[in-house]
Amino acid sequence: MLLAAFLIVLLWNQSARPMRALLWGLIAFQVGETFCAINFIAYRHQSLISEYLHSYGMVLAFGLLTYSLLEVLDIRFHLNRHQSTVRRAGIFTAFMTAILAFLPLTASLSPTEYQTRLFGVSYAYARFGFYQWYEARLLPWLAFSCLTAAGLTILFQKDAPLSNAAKALFSAGVGALGFSFFRVTLGALYADQLVWFEFWEELTELMMVVAVTFILWQYQPSMFKKFFAALRGVIGQGGAK
């Protein structure tokens, strides 16, 4: 969460569309993780609302990060110069990805709840039926709808650049499907070991934020230099006083 907060501050004044999408993706991630912490600490995994808001934040984060990536690809590779190729690839990718939505839809739901002890404190781990219905039923249908709509949008916009609407629909679909895959996979691997479910969920989310930080550092090093230069200036002024 601290690393995500740092990136939010770093990106706050950036005006480029990929950076704005990335900024809001990280804000959604931060909000989702805040509700995750509230559910873990205050409600001991018993709050459906907190868990839903956590999941919703993650779906938004996945989708906005995807949109940011599409914008970067558009800028770097000038996709609009290759409209015919991009259009065919976009239609193919959208419809093929939509088919993948049926993978979690065919997975069975298996609510799990048990008591354990963490550092001597009794704690209840749970994967309620509502959580799993949201992850393995609602999100895949939402993803299928968005991805199909993205494919149709590209299909009927003949000889037109890849529109923002198509990018937004595709990103929303990938966000919903990506989080569904993420949760369904962890749930299948650790159905009876939810401590490991939580461990790998948090670790992979940290890895995602670290990867974003590394990519920004590699391709936008000036942002970091300006930030730390400004920070040193503020610290220097404070020391002078």
Image (cartoon, rainbow, N blue to C red):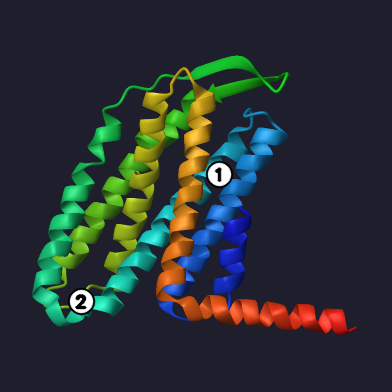
Residue name at image x 78 percent, y 82 percent:
236
Between 80 and 7, the one nearer to me in the picture: 7
Q: Nearer the viewer, mark 2 or mark 1?
A: 2
Residue wearing tag 1: 54
| Quadrant of res 154 | bottom left
| Quadrant of res 21 | bottom left
Question: Residue 35: x percent and y percent?
Answer: 63, 44
| Quadrant of res 6 | bottom right
- Mark 1 packing: few (<14 Cα in 10 Å), some, or many (20+)? many
Which quarter shows the C terminus? bottom right
Asked if residue 101 lies left or right of residue 160, the reply is right
Asked if residue 237 lies left or right of residue 30, the reply is right
- Mark 2 packing: few (<14 Cα in 10 Å), some, or many (20+)? some
Between 93 and 222, the one nearer to me in the picture: 222
Q: Amino acid at mark 1?
A: His
Q: CA distance from mark 2 to mark 1?
A: 34 Å
In terms of sequence position, does the residue under pointer 2 or pointer 1 come before the other?
Answer: 1
Q: Secondary structure at mark 1?
A: helix
Asked if residue 38 lies left or right of residue 236, the reply is left
Question: Residue 11: x percent and y percent?
Answer: 54, 73
Residue name at image x 51 percent, y 67 percent:
23
Q: How many marks?
A: 2
- Disc 2 and disc 1 in contact, CB within 8 angstroms: no
Q: Amino acid at mark 2?
A: Leu
Between 225 and 183, the one nearer to me in the picture: 225
Residue wearing tag 2: 79
Asked if residue 240 lies left or right of residue 171, the reply is right
Residue name at image x 52 percent, y 78 percent:
223
Q: Secondary structure at mark 2?
A: helix
Residue name at image x 58 percent, y 54 percent:
30
Question: Residue 178: x percent and y percent?
Answer: 35, 46
